[in-house]
Amino acid sequence: MVPLVAADRRARSNRSGLTDSLGRFTLDDVQAGRYTIGFLHPVLDSLGVEPLLRELIVDGTRPVRIDLATPSPGQLRAAICGPASGAEAGGVIVAKLA
């Protein structure tokens, strides 16, 4: 889900939309104003990762395109494993189950 939240008095309404299988979305008839936009996903929520929010200005005269992204690998690692100390080098464990 992609929520669009009014960030000023000019933008009087909150909206949301759903993405397609490729993550594309469209929100039609958005009033002019300043908004905050992001996306919600159950996997990120289960990891305790906050969505990355972006500011969006709609002037009401033309379409607006905005690209949203998932948190970086470093942010995901910190959410799952906790903050890294300076002495940690990181690593991967791979196992083959028989």
Image (cartoon, helix red, strand yellow):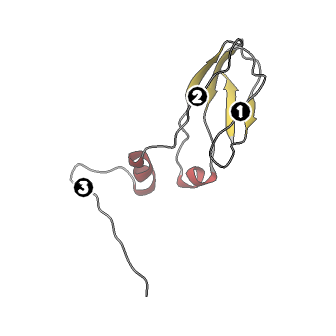
- 21 and 52: which is toward the camera: 21
Q: Are marks 2 and 3 in contact (CB under 8 Å)?
A: no
Where's residue 9, x and y in %? 71, 13
In the rendered view, would you say 74 is above or below 46? above
Instruction: Determine whether the residue tagged by mark 2 lies in a helix, strand or loop.
Output: loop
Q: Say whether disc 2 or disc 3 marks the residue closer to the N-terminus.
A: 2
Q: Quadrant of the C terminus?
A: bottom left
Q: Are marks 2 and 1 in contact (CB under 8 Å)?
A: no
- Within-10-Å neighbours for mark 3: few <14, some 14–19, many 20+: few
Where's residue 46, x and y in %? 58, 55
Q: Between tags 3 and 1, which lies in front?
A: 1
Residue designated by label 3: 88
Residue 93 left/right relative to 33: left
Give the Cα distance between marks 2 and 1.
10 Å
Q: Which mark is residue 66?
A: 2
Give the Cα distance between marks 3 and 1.
43 Å
Where's residue 36, x and y in %? 62, 26
- 15 and 88: which is toward the camera: 15
Q: Quadrant of the N terminus?
A: top right
In the rendered structure, which amino acid carries the disc numbered 3?
Glu
Residue 5 left/right relative to 52: right
In the rendered structure, which amino acid carries the disc numbered 2?
Ile
Q: Say whether disc 3 or disc 1 marks the residue closer to the N-terminus.
A: 1
Residue designated by label 1: 26
Where's residue 60, x and y in %? 71, 13
In the rendered structure, which amino acid carries the disc numbered 1?
Thr
Give the Cα distance between marks 2 and 3.
36 Å
Residue 89 left/right relative to 30: left
User: Which quarter of the figure has residue 64?
Assistant: top right
